[in-house]
């Protein structure tokens, strides 16, 4: 069975309208329902969301594969959707997702259906295949690209089979792996294929067992386990572990088997892993502390949930400035009640008042689940009231999360009859109390001093120091275009505004506008270097860049990462440095062309953005190869 036996023209959305994760799920599910592939669209969406609660299906590299196996599916099917602008799908790499494959498997799906669905996941590991899908402009093109890729994959598999039969071996040790995800449709096979490909490249004798929907495939034998240097278990569900007793075992989430293949295989060859003791049922659910997910995942959860408050509040504050910079102050002759209302909703009495508590609350809930949220919010509020700023909020979030984890362990010894009062009484009372006391008596005072030092440093910046800071902040905005580095620079700019220093955020905004504007200019003046589809997408980047939507550059970066990212970083860094050199200040905590009238030197600021965009465009125009 081919993938295109399950993916048809009536289940393809070539231009998704959704701008949020929930909306994507709704739109794709609705398409499946309209195509008569579902028995119950509500039950199907519930199954999809249940899978998302276990771990995000935004695997990174611009891909998301929401999937479910449920009786709500009438006919096994795949729904494809493409978003040029990208959607924040809570992906593992923090980047927007552009390609969506919603997999609908019925409870009674036969092995052929499940094998075909799993094969799609494997094909998506190919970067060129993904780039071709992003560039496609019709459903027919999507079907043709997938059919062509399947034929190439069949030929490659046959060639690999002949090579293995001819006795070609490996010389760098022997490693085994097990991959598994809760539904056993997508991540299981993507991790297996990613590890297999990297092992071949590293000349490692390798075998992987998959625990998928169709059962265990390629099962590891006792003899193979005995001979192995180490075993990698990349799984988000229980797998049989006692067989690995006495072996070096690396235990990580299945996503790490997709994203950190070389690191895992290198550690396995070096036997850089504890020896598994066996007979402990909980060990298969532990995440290796070296997986690197922890702090990054928790921090991004806080920042991602904080950003809507920044954007919404920032735009409302910017709108209030159109009535006059001081129009929200009742004591000022420019006072306007509408300006005050906008400022109150978006500013220190509204959205911006919640920034630090929200940051802390969602960091804590990422660590300790729902019981961590309230202590985190309270800790963040105490930090904000003490002027400990974002640094205080970060500390409060991690502190509250780990305090609640400790409480969970302590209260696990209580009688089972008290289980119901833990989340509504014990965790919030003791979590808030301990977090609050530590914040008030140990954390807030020194962190407030550090925050004040940062404020003084920002306000004292001048000359070369200011230009260098603008260079760094502008460049950071273009490195991952909406990812964690971009968000870190944006958050720093907001913290600077909070410290009454308005120059850094102007540099941040300039850097964020340059990548899409530079690409738009390049597609206009160097048309021979871009395909027709890219030229059309390039035109939309004029509007995205003007609206401070850096993510408009992502499809181009995905198709040609080295040239696009390097050119964008150089242009954005130049714009940020010039903004600081021109002493431009921006009091509004957002970006885009509509806040430019609020800066102190609008003409110089536009010049900085234009110069940075032209540099990016020229670099791309010279560097990129002509289209055939």
Image (cartoon, rainbow, N blue to C red):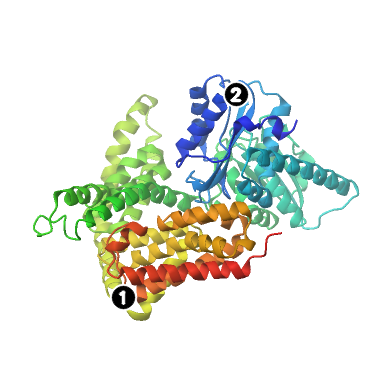
* Local crowd size for mark 2, using a 10 Å CA cut-off: few (<14), some (14–19), many (≥20): many
500 or 207, which is in the foreground? 500
Side of 450 relative to 410 (left or right): left
385 over 408 or under it: above or below: below
Side of 388 relative to 151 (left or right): left
Disc number lying in front (1 or 2): 2
Q: Which residue is mark 1?
A: 461
Q: Earlier in the sequence, mark 1 or mark 2?
A: 2
Q: Which residue is mark 2?
A: 37
- Mark 1: which secondary structure? loop
155 or 436, which is in the foreground? 155
530 over 254 or under it: above or below: below
Q: Residue at x 19, y 51 (%)?
A: 339
Q: Quadrant of residue 189?
A: top right
77 over 589 or under it: above or below: above
Q: Is residue 245 visible?
A: no
């Amino acid at each position: 069975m081919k993938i295109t036996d399950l993916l048809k023209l009536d289940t393809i959305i070539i231009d998704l309208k959704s701008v949020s994760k929930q909306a994507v799920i709704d739109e794709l599910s609705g398409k499946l329902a309209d195509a008569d592939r579902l028995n119950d669209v509500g039950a199907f969406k519930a199954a999809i969301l249940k899978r998302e609660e276990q771990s995000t299906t935004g695997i990174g590299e611009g891909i998301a594969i929401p999937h479910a196996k449920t009786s709500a599916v009438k006919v096994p099917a795949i729904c494809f959707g493409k978003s040029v602008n990208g959607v924040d799908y809570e992906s593992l790499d923090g980047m927007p997702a552009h390609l969506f494959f919603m997999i609908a498997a019925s409870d009674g799906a036969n092995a052929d259906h499940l094998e075909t669905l799993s094969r799609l996941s494997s094909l998506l590991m190919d970067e060129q295949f993904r780039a071709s899908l992003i560039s496609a402009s019709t459903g027919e093109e999507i079907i043709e690209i997938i059919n062509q890729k399947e034929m190439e994959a069949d030929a490659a598999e046959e060639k690999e089979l002949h090579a293995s039969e001819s006795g070609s071996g490996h010389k760098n040790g022997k490693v085994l792996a097990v991959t598994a995800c809760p539904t056993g449709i997508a991540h299981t096979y993507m991790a297996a294929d990613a590890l297999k490909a990297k092992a071949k490249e590293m000349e490692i004798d390798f075998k992987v067992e998959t625990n998928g929907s169709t059962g265990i495939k390629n099962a590891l034998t006792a003899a193979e386990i005995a001979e192995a240097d180490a075993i990698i278990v990349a799984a988000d569900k229980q797998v049989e572990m006692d067989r690995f007793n006495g072996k070096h075992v690396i235990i990580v989430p299945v996503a790490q088997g997709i994203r950190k293949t070389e690191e895992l295989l290198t550690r396995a060859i070096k036997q850089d892993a504890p020896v598994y003791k066996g007979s402990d049922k909980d060990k298969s659910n532990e995440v290796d502390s070296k997986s690197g997910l922890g702090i990054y995942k928790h921090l991004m959860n806080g920042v991602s949930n904080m950003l809507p408050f920044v954007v919404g509040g920032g735009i409302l504050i910017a709108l209030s400035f159109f009535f006059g910079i001081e129009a929200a102050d009742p004591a000022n002759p420019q006072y306007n009640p509408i300006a005050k209302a906008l400022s109150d909703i978006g500013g220190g009495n509204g959205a911006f008042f919640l920034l630090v508590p929200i940051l802390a609350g969602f960091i804590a809930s990422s660590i300790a689940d729902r019981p961590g949220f309230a202590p985190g919010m309270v800790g963040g509020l105490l930090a904000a009231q003490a002027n400990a700023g974002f640094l205080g909020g970060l500390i409060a979030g991690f502190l509250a999360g780990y305090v609640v984890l400790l409480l969970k362990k302590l209260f696990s010894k209580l009688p089972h009859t008290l289980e119901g009062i833990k989340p509504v009484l014990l965790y919030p009372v003791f979590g808030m109390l301990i977090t609050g006391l530590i914040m008030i008596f140990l954390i807030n005072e020194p962190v407030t001093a550090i925050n004040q030092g940062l404020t003084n440093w920002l306000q004292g910046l001048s000359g070369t120091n200011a230009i260098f800071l603008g260079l760094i902040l502008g460049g950071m905005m273009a490195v991952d275009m909406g990812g964690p580095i971009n968000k870190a620079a944006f958050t720093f700019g907001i913290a600077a505004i909070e410290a009454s220093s308005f120059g850094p955020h102007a540099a941040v905004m300039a850097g964020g506008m340059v990548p899409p504007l530079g690409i738009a200019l390049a597609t206009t003046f160097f048309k021979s270097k871009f395909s027709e589809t890219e030229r059309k997408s390039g035109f939309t980047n004029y509007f995205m860049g003007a609206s401070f939507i850096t993510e408009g550059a992502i499809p181009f970066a995905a198709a040609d990462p080295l040239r696009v990212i390097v050119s964008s970083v150089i242009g954005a860094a130049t714009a940020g440095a010039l903004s600081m050199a021109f002493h431009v200040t921006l009091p509004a905590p957002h970006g885009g062309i509509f806040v430019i009238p609020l800066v102190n030197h609008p003409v110089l600021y536009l010049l900085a953005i234009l110069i940075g965009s032209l540099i990016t465009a020229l670099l791309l125009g010279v560097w990129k190869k002509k289209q055939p």
